[in-house]
Image: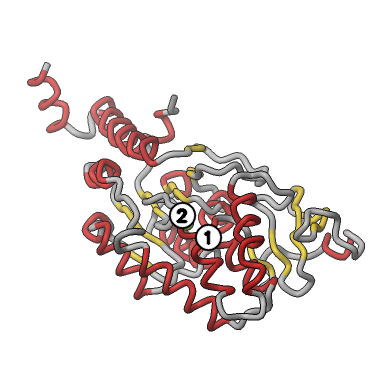
């Protein structure tokens, strides 16, 4: 199932947090409700929640991997590096000529990548022209609920154990765009702070990941020794792939992103298994190379 050759040279693993170390999308409908509550658009709540569900389950013309244009209120479809089509919220073709978008850079600040469920809510908040403060307060509210009954999400302890037991790599890093306060609360809830060396909250991915990758290269790591794992291709994987690093996409949802990743996983059980395969691949290679006599002796004793 896994190509152990490239896994055996991994020295740094960079983990995203939300959607990567836990999986939960039950918050999305509440998030949308809190966004619209008490606004002139409150009557649209049910329809907006339906739309959110439809995108999640890939039953809508707007798909994960598209970008939302906050100024023109359309979603943009990419082919290669170019935007080739625009779509309105009801899934019909956008009005302006598609070539207007062809030369747009996906890095424009007014484009929101619909890369994970959080991106759907962010796009909807712009659709309804809600103030930034409302997005923030709905975000805080729903994030607080995610850590308490009845909405507290399930922790995948076997995954955390497998990350802990991945001792053969030199560095395990956590990078999340979630701001410090909520990031720290989530890490505390999962009890995983001790698993990582470098931890970055408010990491400003994708740009922040590109800089972090550069800092690893400056420390002497080679690109192919660095593996990034995440559920949001635009934030977590593209910057690393561009620089020659290894990538693992983990998400239960289909994605329209045409890029091919080194690994494509859906569930946390698979990620736990990957951690163990990396550990075995590295230790196995070191024994074969004679790099690790202690390990080899141990293996011989165990027969
Ligand atoms: Mg994520």
Q: Residue 123's spot in the image, x, y percent?
A: 64, 67
Q: Is residue 145 left or right of residue 72?
A: left
In the rendered image, which quarter is residue 85 located in? bottom right
Residue at figure coordinates x 36%, y 71% from the top left: 182
Q: Residues within 10 Å of mark 1 (few under 14, many from 20)?
A: many
Q: Which mark is residue 29?
A: 1
Residue at figure coordinates x 92%, y 62% from the top left: 97
The N terminus appears in which quarter of the rendering? top left
Q: Residues within 10 Å of mark 2 (few under 14, many from 20)?
A: few
**Circle 1 — which element?**
helix
* Above or below 255: residue 196: below
The C terminus appears in which quarter of the rendering? top left
Q: Is residue 47 left or right of residue 193?
A: right
Q: Is residue 167 shown to the viewer in this render?
A: no
Q: Is residue 38 left or right of residue 5?
A: right
**Circle 2 — which element?**
loop
The span from disc 2 to disc 1 (Cα, nearest Å) is 7 Å
* Above or below 194: residue 287: above
Is the C-beta of the residue carrying label 1 under 8 Å from the nearest atom of ligand 1? no
* Above or below 281: residue 116: below
Residue that extends furthest to the right in the rendered view of this protein: 97
Q: Which mark is residue 26?
A: 2
**Residue contact between numbered discs 2 and 1, judged by CB atoms under 8 Å:** yes
Residue at figure coordinates x 28%, y 50% from the top left: 170
Q: Is residue 67 left or right of residue 180?
A: right
Q: Residue 149's spot in the image, x, y percent?
A: 29, 60
Q: Decide which of 298, 263 is in the foreground and name it.
A: 263
Q: Residue 64's spot in the image, x, y percent?
A: 63, 51
């Amino acid at each position: 199932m896994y190509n152990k050759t490239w896994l055996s040279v991994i020295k740094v693993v960079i983990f995203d947090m939300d959607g990567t170390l836990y999986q939960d999308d039950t918050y999305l409908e509440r998030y949308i409700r809190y966004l619209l509550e008490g606004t002139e658009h409150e009557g649209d709540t049910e329809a907006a929640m339906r739309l959110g569900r439809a995108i999640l389950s890939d039953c809508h013309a707007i798909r994960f991997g598209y970008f939302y244009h906050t100024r023109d209120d359309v979603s943009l479809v990419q082919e290669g590096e170019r935007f080739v089509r625009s779509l309105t919220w009801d899934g019909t073709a956008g009005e302006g000529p598609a070539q207007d978008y062809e030369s747009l850079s996906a890095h424009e600040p007014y484009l929101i990548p619909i890369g994970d469920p959080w991106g759907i809510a962010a796009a909807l908040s712009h659709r309804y022209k809600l103030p930034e403060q409302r997005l923030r307060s709905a975000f805080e509210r729903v994030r607080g609920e995610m850590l308490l009954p009845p909405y507290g999400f399930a922790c995948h302890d076997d995954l955390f154990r497998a990350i802990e037991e991945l001792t053969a790599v030199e560095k395990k890093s956590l990078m999340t765009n979630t701001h410090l306060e909520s990031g720290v609360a989530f890490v505390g809830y999962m009890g995983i702070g001790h698993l990582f060396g470098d931890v970055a909250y408010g990491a400003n991915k994708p740009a922040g990941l590109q800089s972090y990758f550069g800092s690893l290269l400056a420390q002497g790591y080679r690109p192919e020794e660095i593996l990034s794992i995440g559920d949001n291709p635009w934030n977590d994987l593209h910057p690393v792939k561009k620089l020659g690093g290894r990538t693992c996409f983990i998400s239960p949802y289909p994605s329209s992103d045409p890029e091919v990743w080194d690994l494509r996983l859906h569930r946390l059980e698979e990620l736990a298994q990957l951690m163990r395969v990396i550990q075995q691949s590295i230790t196995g290679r070191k024994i074969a190379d004679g790099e690790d006599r202690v390990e080899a002796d141990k293996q011989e004793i165990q027969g």
